Image (cartoon, rainbow, N blue to C red):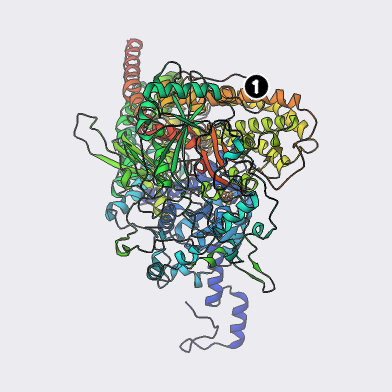
Amino acid sequence: MSVQSTVRPEWTVVIDPVLQKELEQHIFVTNWPKLLEMIDTVYNWGRRSSLWPLGFGLACCAIEMICSACSRFDISRFGAEVFRGSPRQADVMIVSGTVTKTMMPMIARLYDQMPEPKYVISMGACASGGGPFKEGYNVVSGIDKYLPVDVYVPGCPPTPQALLNGLIALQKKIDGESLADAVWYKPEVERDIPVPVLGPDLIDVRFLEITAEKTAQGVLDAIQADMPKPLIIPAPQPEKAEEPAAAQASAAAAPMSAADKLRAKMGGAKPAEAPAAEAPKPAAKPAAPAKKIKKAEARPSLVWLGNDKLKALSDRLNGEFGAGTSTIIEAGLLIPADRLLAVGKFLRDDRSTRYDYLASLQSVHYEDCIEVNYHLDSTVHPGTLIELRVRTDEAEGKGEVPSLTDIWPGAEFQEREVFDMMGVRFKGHPNLTRILMWEGYAYYPLRKDFLEPYYEGPTKVFDSRVEEGHGHHFRSEELNPYGTNLKIPRGYEDWDKLSSNDDVKGKNLMPGGVQISELETDQFVVSMGPQHPSTHGVFRMNLRVDGETVVGLKPVMGYMHRNHEKIGERNTYLMNFPFTDRLDYLTSMGNNFGYALAVEQLMGDDAKVPERAEYIRVIMAELTRVASHMWAIGFFLNDIGAFFTPALYAIEERELILDLFEWASGSRMMCNYFRFGGVAFDLPKGWKERCHKFVYDRLDGKIDELDKLLTGNEILLDRCKGIGALTAEQAIAWSTAGPVLRASGVNYDIRRAAPYSIYDRFDFNVIVGKNGDLFDRYYVRLQEMRESVKILKQAVRDLPEGPILPGKKSYQIKVPAGEAYSRVENPKGELGYYVVSDGSATAYRYHVRSPSFINLTSLETMCVGATVADVVGILGSLDIVLGEVDR
Amino acid sequence: MLEIIGLIIKISIVVGVTQGAVAYLILVERKIAAFSQDRIGPNRVGPLGLLQPIVDGVKMFLKEDVTPNYVNKPIFILAPFLSIVTAMIGFAVVPFGPVGPNGPGLFDGPIQFQIAPGIDIGLLYIFAVGSLAVYGVILAGYSSNNKYSFLGGLRSSAQIISYEIPMGLSVLGIVLLASSLDLNTIIQWQDKNAWGIFVQPLGFFIFLICAFAETNRLPFDLPESEQELVGGFHTEYSSMKFGMFFLGEYLHVITVSFLVVILYLGGWDPPFVSLGDSGWLMAILKVGTLITKVLAMIVFVMWIRWTLPRFRYDRLMELAWKRMIPLAIGNTVVTALILQLIRR
Ligand code: SF4
């Protein structure tokens, strides 16, 4: 094959050189290279123009990847719209989003299953290098650590145009290839990627020995031992009567100034000894004059039971269950663990309280304890939110709290999450296994004493990474002796037990089944996902099926766990805004809204939102709702088999809304538009008119069109009516939220139940369904869009002039110490942010109550007894977004 | 001798044309999808993207052909061939134009626009061959040793059992009317009297629905159903083997469209005018009419795919057993009764 010369071999007949010359002029193919060139042309032409992508999306970038198929961008022009669900039929893998450690073995497997020639496009900052989530403990810093990448597409997320550009770049690359040196025809080149193993961390088997060696030496632990640690504060204690609240700020830290405290946080006990390169800038600043940490008003949420009634309730509990049952701490009730079940039952069932809805459950790691706290609300008396606190041993793996799953089944996944992240055990929990990380992962990452592999300091911004004068720019990889995002406890021994065939993520979640038919039939387990066309991202379900009937189901998640909360505890308050965008990446404005509210609750009057900004916020939030519901309906239809057509129609409207967002905030998807006390920028000139036109002249018609085309369709009705039904009681008990809850007939919408912002000024209805089946969920969403349009019309009409922030734009946010839980009605349901502030620049604890995640708790109940096809529809009707499920 | 040569020529024409047509049908499908989704569709290779099928073919041929080591090899390899072959041999009895003594003459006899003219059990033959096609799917699903494929295969076998029956029953009406199983005779009957769709509306409807189910097209594409089973029976197939399934599917669409047109839409009989019996011109016109109708039918099939959601598996069974079979039986009985009454 490698004959390069045109010299004719000796054995050929000698011909006249003149004749040879003439021949060469008239005959096209005269030698090997020329022939090869011609074949190459055809060969490359075939591959370049028919690049079928593997249909799998990892994170936010996947949304833009899908959008590249919609009418505005239309990737099909390049012949590349044929997204294949099976890797065997795909040519190019578009790695669209954050590559997590949990997902990496799957990606490697998919890559190995693709037939040659295969290509990889790395889409977005995350896939290319870890992106904003790089320092997360579950994030792989770039897919190129494992797979060979052909084209990198920068952006976060790259717009669809950028992806198309990447595709064209790949085509150009293919044009330059030649059969002669195609690696896939060289048997000596090993193209398969060894599948990495989920052990104590993600372990690349290619470097197994060196990893083991370094672990035994404990190099990382040694380095991290010298690093400044995050501050850990004691838990708040009950108020002594009459003392001013401010003096009660966490005892140890109270006399310190904010700056002192910050420094303490950076440097632990010995700030002076911290290496200069690692000490963040603020530490070098001169200390501010000492002043007390401001304390925020103690209240669990903006709308809640109120101090007096809480006192009464506490007294009542003490009367009912004996003194000491309930102590009020920071407007929450501290309950001893052994009485929690009794109190919970009482609160749920008593006529006067009826706390039937567990809104949220989270935990905080304090110096002296781990606190698990519960936010309860009542669907009978909405807006009477209270907070329960339970405290348990702080030591790693020692804490234990009774499980509340019997009282509020919706606690199931949230308790598992606390177990996974903090190591607190829940006694009586039906299946207490890790939920986001995998079984065998070595740490409890949300404990304050866990430092991530790329840990550099307690607060971002880190010091400059450019060594002055040397032009050397060092990366986090260089700070970790493994050279990658890896941390393994020193004593780890079981290296030879690691096997990449072990399904550590799913093996504890194999559904049991029941015999349903009288015939003796075989049941088998199908694992749907994490790469599956209709799991809406990297979600996985282990199904046990009897024929087509599902007899058992266990959701497996965490494939997109990118450590939002841990990272959020190192971000300064302002810096965290763009991260909230990436939770439910279809509703960035709504996520911003909730986060802003939480911190504003702590800031109190310092962050009083001006009128104009309130209106703008509502307009943005409602536009988001329309966009998100459009997407939800479109893809729900897709899930029940209407191949992309409804989805693409719905995306069209979404695109128009994204245009408005982009115009106002600068970004289509990740708007980062809200600020504490207002919004980032005023609306550009002409924005209001365009929005007015869109809302008044177009949206209604389009919603009607969807309604007309879809709602009456017999197949749709047949697929939806009576499927996946949840009764009202079930929906409440499982803590479902948003359209899922309302479709079951529960009139509970945070905008009305616990009004925030200026929603009380608008005239709109809370849409409620009857049967809680797929159809109702679909139809509730459809009608909610109409209500949103109604709100939008009023808001756009009344939008006043004025400032958009209470004061000047500020980058130094001072947040008083305290606790806040904000709730907004996001398109997916109640989105809550729980923030504990210690008065420093970063949140002490930051937790997201994610509606997508909690709505999934009821999935098993809905699916058992249904068919495989229904499961797909049911999942679609929940409208989950993995960014929010796994966070 | 001449006859055999003619036969070979005919076969090659049919095979060539249908294979080419299939490649282009895939493009047509993509264009229709684009059209119904407000997009443009492939347009980068060749004018209007016309070379897209060729590009896809080249790529498929040159792709690595993976045979996973957990599959049942012989069957795994056999399955795609089965699916293509069974889809092809149905064409043996399909009349593409007029057949009979009055055809345009060439050499020493009239040309018969049918590979095997004069088979008087044409319809039976098509049904027999058509139901073989499912073996491709079932075997693929079985041999892949993959749970999705397996479910796809299961669905397919259940579907075929259910849909062969109403399909067979639904054509009995038109067969009774034309008193023949020969496709040609059926067309001639329609030419003389009225199109099947007018005299057998119910039969037409049932047949159409079953035709969709037979071809595994939405809203009945259960064995494949991308959203549920990833790729269903062909999940494990790559390269040209996968391409063969693709071709097989579209071949099937063509066969079925021919059948619908022949049985119910008058075959080569154009609407409103009646064509004479002999001569080249007439023959060409007839072939043209037939092809046009078939194309329209194919476009219709595709249009449906991009419009409707999918049935659920058990509902599909219900539809077949509880609704269509009784209706089809009723249709046959009523037709027979009326015929008896009229004849008397
Ligand atoms: S954060 Fe999201 S949008 Fe940004 S690069 Fe990562 S996956 Fe893409």
Asked if A554 appears above or below A178 in the picture, the reply is above
> On the rendered image, what quadrant is the C terminus of chain B found in?
top left
Determine if residue B192 is in view: no
Quarter of the view holding residue A645: top right
Q: Is residue A261 left or right of residue B235?
A: right
Q: Indicate whether A139 appears above or below A862.
A: below
Q: Residue at x 70, y 52 (%)?
A: A288
The reply to whether residue B212 is in sight is yes
**In the image, A160: left or right of A200?**
right
Which of the pair A660/B294 is nearer the observer? A660
Residue receiving disc 1: A760
Quadrant in which residue A587 is drawn: top right
A790 over A277 or under it: above or below:
above
Q: Mark 1 — on which chain does it sit?
A: A
SS of the residue at dot 1? helix
Kind of residue at disc 1: Asp
- Residue B246 in percent (x, y) is at 43, 46
Query: At which x and y percent is residue A377?
Result: 49, 25
Residue A340 horizontal side relative to residue A133, left or right: left
Mark 1 neighbour class, 10 Å CA radius: few under 14, some 14 to 19, many 20 or more? few
Residue A207 occupies quadrant: bottom left
Q: Which residue is at the front of the view, A173 or B299?
A: A173
The percent position of residue A776, horizontal first and vertical second, equals: 48, 23
